[in-house]
Amino acid sequence: MTDLPYSTPAAAAAAPRISRTGVLFAALGAAGLALPLVQFKPNRIVAGEGMRLPDALPAALGWGLTAALVAALLAGLSPRLALPARLALGLAGLLATVVALGVSAGYLMPEGNTIARVAPSAGFWLLTLAFALMVADAQSRMHLPLRRRWLMLGAAIVSAALILSSGLLDGTSVMREYAARADLFGREAVRHLLLAFGSLGLALVVGLPLGIALYNRPGLRGPVLGTLNLLQTIPSLALFGIMIPLLGWVALHLPGAQALGVSGIGPFPALIALFIYSLLPVVSNTVVGLAGVSPEARDAAVGTGMTERQILTGILLPLALPSIIAAVRIVLVQNIGLAVIAGLIGGGGFGTFVFQGLNQTAMDLVLLGALPTIALALVSGVSLDLAVEGLERGAASRGSP
């Protein structure tokens, strides 16, 4: 669903008068403005009163900001709006929505009241989605150079850090949950990263040699990849559950296992389950990447007298690197999300907050675990997408005459 460029006057005359993507963004934004921006709750558990944007802020600011957001959404309806302007409108809309949330928390919260909560509601999430989609749409159609997209990603991370450290959002419900658990949050964040990156590291240590072996022994590919594919189809909750009795038995009956950290519950079974899920992408992408190297490149290496090891490390693996990094991207994003389930079996991570929140019917606590997980997965996915694109361009330039 993209708008077409108008390369000729005839094409411009035949162009739609309204941007199709702009209609989608405007519909989402209009729903966001019609629904409550925040929920004001007497405490963290009970349902609160929904308040729309004009009611959640001082009158002049609330109506002024509403008018500005409506104007931005209407401007996005024009197919002739320049892409840089569309990008700027999206960024401004995102910033205004976040500022509105922070200011509403300070405006609605009674002075000295530490029990009440101001939580983001459906209107906030829809406005955020509308303007985030507007930014993504403009950015993708501008075909920015790779370096500029890296700069945009860095600027987005720095901007988020500045907003959080500025105290603007300190009055919101999620940040109040964070303030009460700052030490625990840091510990669980480290554990979440260890689960995601640790399982990825194990998968690379095992999967890369296995992929190379399958490349050299084509007859083994079917049985091995079929087995890994079968393991991949096991539902995550079931696999985590299988690990509990299996590793519990190993910890009880294998001498020295407990001293190595093997246990039926805790981070170890979660790490093993994530490792099992990681193997198929790493192994299959390694085989595909190596098999995709042109025979001419291999023949040229043989002709220069290179040994098999030199051909593998100097020719095949560097040329297969984009495919292997693509596997790393798949595994990392997948494991950052799946690591949440580790909280269910005592493995820690952001899932600890998610399941505590579900047990206490405290959605703010659920968000304290869910939001950093989503942010971490997005940043990892975009970073590795850019890395893969850079590697592919490098490989293409090296292969061009």
Image (tube, grey):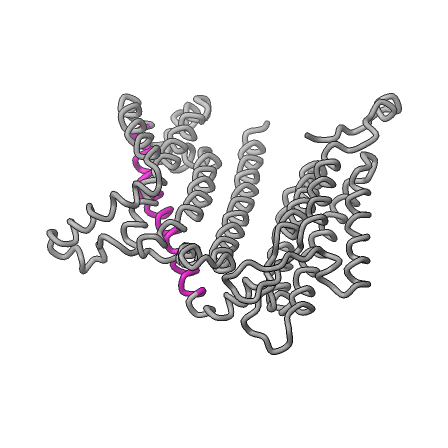
Of all residues shown, which one is farthest toward the bottom?
Answer: 112
**Is 228 placed left or right of 12 in the picture?**
left
Residue 377 horizontal side relative to residue 91, left or right = left
Q: Is residue 212 magenta?
A: yes
Report the residue at 39% width, 33% height from top.
286
Residue lying at 72% horizontally and 56% vertically, measured from the top left: 53
Look at the image and tell me whether residue 148 can be seen.
no
In the figure, residue 302 lies in which quadrant?
top left
| Quarter of the C terminus within the rendering | top right
Horizontally, residue 157 falls left or right of residue 310, namely: right
Q: Percent from the top left, x then y, of residue 273?
A: 31, 44
Q: Nearer the viewer, residue 149 or 216?
A: 149
Q: Which residues are magenta?
A: 185-214
- Picture coordinates of residue 305 (x, y %)? 37, 29
The residue sitting at 76% across, 65% down in the picture is 58
On the image, which quarter does residue 393 sit in?
top right
- Camera-nearest residue between 19 and 284: 19
Rendering coords of residue 321 (x, y %): 45, 37
57 vs 329, left or right, is right
Q: Quadrant of the N terminus?
A: top right
Q: Is residue 261 magenta?
A: no
**In the rendered image of this protein, does residue 55 appear above or below residue 295?**
below
